[in-house]
Every structure is written in structure tokens, then in C-alpha cells.
Image (cartoon, helix red, strand yellow):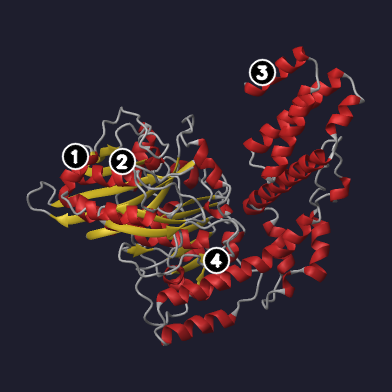
Amino acid sequence: MALWGPDSSGPCSRGPLEEAGAAAEEREAPAAEAAAAVAVPLDEEEDDGRGLLRWDGFSAWLHCVCVVGFDLELGQAVEVIYPQHSKLTDKEKTNICYLSFPDSNSGCLGDTQFCFRFRQSSGRRVSLHCFLDQFDKDLPVYLKKDPAYFYGYVYFRQVRDKTLKRGYFQKSLVLISKLPYIHFFHTVLKQIAPEYFEKSKPYLEAACNDVDRWPAPVPGKTLYLPIMGVVMKVRIPTCHDKPGTTQIVQVADTHISVVLSTVHEVDLFRCFFPVFFHSQMLWELVLLGEPLVVMAPSPSESSETVLALVNCISPLKYFSDFRPYFTIHDSEFKEYTTRTQAPPSVILGVTNPFFAKTLQHWPHIIRIGDLKPAGEIPKQVKVKKLKNLKTLDSKPGVYTSYKPYLNRDEEIIKQLQKGVQQKRPSEAQSVILRRYFLELTQSFIIPLERYVASLMPLQKSISPWKSPPQLRQFLPEEFMKTLEKTGPQLTSRIKGDWIGLYRHFLKSPNFDGWFKTRRKEMTQKLEALHLEALCKEDLLLWTQKHTEVETVDLVLKLKSKLLQADREHLPVKPETMEKLRGHIDAIILALPEDLQSILLKTSMT
């Protein structure tokens, strides 16, 4: 679908880069004028010239934008929701209110950015457009939208203001989205939030109108995104990209203000710096889906650290719940802090001292101080017993009785320590640490991938006249036997109890999620191979040897197969689909006219 095209002013032959540049120049006008020039009544659902309805472009990126302020009588309150037709339940609004402000003990003066994640209310109608869902299939598994959750990206400002009763100006600009593009949305907020706090509503309307003109978030395409006089150049990764590489080219261009090398990654080394001696142990805890709490002094530190933990097992997806910033007001507070059952598989980021007491029964707690630039080698933080954690003021460290399965890799620690001594930039340190985690995860997952691939039936067993064969069952003990010859020792220098780690992993939510995903992909591959087998048959000749009832049954089954291929985005070549449609048409035309009309009608419904 072409999302860049002529606007209402007449023909346009400029490319996306020129369009973006032109849009940036137009934004030099005052925000109020810009808003007036592009504002369209919200109840008008007109086509904007790109084949999209009003606000469809905006909805591809964001659910809505909220402004949360502090009311002396009500406390935190949502002051603005834009676009005004955006729907949020009362429960969602309450969660946004409390999650958009730091806890009072954080003492965040000035500007603070952080991220939160919250459950979508049950019963909400899915409003994502079908044409956007097709982009999801091309994303890496860890960037796919989770239909049950929203992300909130926050820019919070707290400054002294003697004219206000409270003595402080406190306000948050919050972007609510289904997309986990942390770095991208934080960059967007940096561009628009400071000026919004000065210029208020007209500026916000103008910024939202800019977003509505953006091209869709298509994975693999270089996108030029203008917003309020700035043009951002981004590329969303695809599932076909080589893990650990960036595909965007850094080319100097006068039109472009910001080039983002990543849309979703955080500064990994900065987040792990306080506890990097235990990076490998934390990788194990995340891989196994163990309950984990990050206690931090502010929402910025808590959210960045939780996101770094989730990111450390990439390209494996973390399938359990995680909350970059969690408060005592959260709707899941009771569910996650109860002592009547074992702590759930979730990673929580908290800042309120109350949690030091409430979550004392959790098995693994990371206590971090302020995330300062990594300028000196941190003291080796020892793993401490949980009984030593009394308050949030306890010393930074990892509080757990967990014994890692693998021996610690001293090489990576020496490499990072050397980088600190040589004042290597944090970005470069993050590249080293990310590569280390990637190689560790790949060494772990390759034997599993190899075994699961062996569960696939042979192609010669696929018959066009029978249902596709089933995958063989995953047998843990059979898999364990493969590790002796084709285990992680082939690709990793790390020694230890790999077998024990696998046994634990096979009982975890991450294995369950990973295997369900792989099983679905392989089942779809079998369906696609079955369609190809059908295409190679002379179906018309088959109908000549069978009754009309059997022929009609075949046509209906073939049509059902085509619908399934479209609906589930099966990996079928377009020419295979066309050939199958041709087969169906030829069979229908060979039938009596009364049956032809009935079958043609079913094609149209």
C-alpha cells in the first residue's frame, strides 16, 4: 500500500525524503498556525489521499497521547487525551495516571524520561487494522505486538513554580502505544515534550497531525518521519536481519536531523554496569523466567534496567510479564505481591521503599543505585542473602540464593574492565556486552533448534490427498541425548552444568512460548508444502474420475485452504496461490451450470 502520495493541494512527484524535508520546513511556522492549518474535525473520517482514513496513519504508531497533571484535590489526573476519540477504560486511565509520575520519594527534579507497561482491559475491541497486522509477521519475535499490553512512554517535568499552590509545576506527556520501540519513542518525546510544556495544546495537535502523515511502520524499510521541524530517519528490524547487526546507513543529509541506529535497544552496559560481575547469572535468571525485582532510586533507572534484562536473552523472546515501572497503585499489585502463593514469573521495576518489605519473599532482588556514566571500575558487588535486604536503602547488589548452572566467563569481565580503564564509550561497551549475550543465547538455543527441526516430517511423506502429517512429539530425554555430540560446547567456551540449565529451561514459560511459536511456524510450513503438492497435481483429471459431490467437496476444501493461507499468512509463494485459484476456476467451469452459479456465489461471499 502506497502511504506517500499526492495531498489535497495537487499532484506531487517528490519522494519520501523530499516530502519529509518539506514538512520540516513548514513546521518553522508557529505551532498554533501549524495546528490551525492542518486541524480537521475529529468526527470527519475522510480519506487523506494515501488510501487511509483520518487518524489511520497515527493509529499505526500510537494509540493516543495523554497529558497527566497534578490536581491538589484529585491527585494525578489525565488532563488531555488526543486524538479526542481515543478510547481508554477507567481502569486504563487510572493505571496511566499513577504510572506517569515518579514516586514522591524519587525526588526527580527537572526532566525525567521513563517507560511503563500495563495490561489492556479485558473485553476491549481490537482496533488495529488488518493491513497493519501483516507487518507484524515480518518482525523479529521479540518485537511483535502483544495484544494484551500497552506501553507508556513518559516525559515528566517537575520544576519549582511559586505561582502554584503546591510550589511545583508537575506534568507528564505520555505516548501510549502497542509498539515496544523504546529508544524511538523516547527520541520523539525529546523532540516535542519540552516545547509542548511551553506552548501547550495547539503544539500537541500539530505534532499529532505530523504523526498521522507518517508512513506505516513497515519492517525493513528506511522511514523518514517528520515531526515539528525535525526529520527522523529510522529502520524497523525484520526477522530476516542477522541478529546483532544494524542495517541503517549513516549518510549525511541536510534534510535529516536525527538518525536512529536502533528503535528498541537501551544502553545495555550502562544498565548492567552496577552489577556487571553478575551479568551471566542474571542472563540465566531471565532465561529461566525466574521472579525478579529491580529496586532502583527512580523510574528511569528501574525501567531501563528491566528493559535491559528482557533484552539480554535476545533474539529469544522473554515470554513472561515484565513491568519496567511498577507502583503500589497498579491494578496487579495484589496479584503480584501476595504471599499465599509462589511469586509469579515476572520482572518488576520498583522505586517505592514499601516494596523492600512487600517483596521480601521474592527469590531474586537486584538493588541498584544511580546509573552514573561508567567512568570507573565498580567494586565487585557480592551476591547477598535475601535476609540482608531490609530497606530500599540497603547497599546495591544482587540478593539471591540462586547458584548459577554455568561457570562465570572471566574473559568478558576483563574485556569490559579494560574498556572502563581506557574510557571506552558506553555505546562501544554495550556492543561488546550485547554480542556476548547474543553468542551465549545462540549457543544455548542452537541445539534446541536442531532437535526441533528433526521433528518435522520428511517432505516425501506429504500427500496431496491426505491431511498434512503431524510433527513428532518433543521428548525431553531424547533431546538431552543429542547434547553429548551437538550441545553448546561446539560454540561456547563456557563450562558448567548445561544439562541442568536445559532441564530447568524446559519447565519455564520461555521454553513454552518459544516451542509454541516454533511449532506454529513448522505446522504452517507443512500446510504450505501441502498446498504446493496440490498444485502439482492434475486436479481436473482427478475430477473426471470422481462424482460431482466429491468434486464440489474438493472445490470447497481448496477454497478453505486459500482462505487459511491468506488469514494465517502461510509461507506460500504467490505463484502457488495463483495456480491453485486457476485449478479451482477450471474445475468449476467443468461442472454443470447450476453448480457453477452456486460455487461462484460462495467465492464472492
Q: Which residue is mark 4?
A: 282
Q: Nearer the viewer, residue 464 or 512?
A: 464
Give the CA distance from mark 4 to mark 2. 57 Å
Q: Earlier in the sequence, mark 4 or mark 1?
A: 1
Question: Which label sits on residue 10?
Answer: 2
Question: Which label sits on residue 36?
Answer: 1
Q: Which residue is mark 3?
A: 601
Foreground tag (1 vs 2): 2
Mark 3: few, some, or many residues within 10 Å (few <14, many ≥20)? few
Mark 2: few, some, or many residues within 10 Å (few <14, many ≥20)? few
- Residue type at tag 1: Ala
Residue 120, image x and y in percent?
Answer: 45, 38
Q: Earlier in the sequence, mark 3 or mark 4?
A: 4
- Residue type at tag 4: Leu
Q: Earlier in the sequence, mark 1 or mark 2?
A: 2
Q: Nearer the viewer, residue 382 or 492?
A: 492
Locate residue 316: give its quadrant. Answer: bottom right
| Residue at disc 3, secondary structure | helix
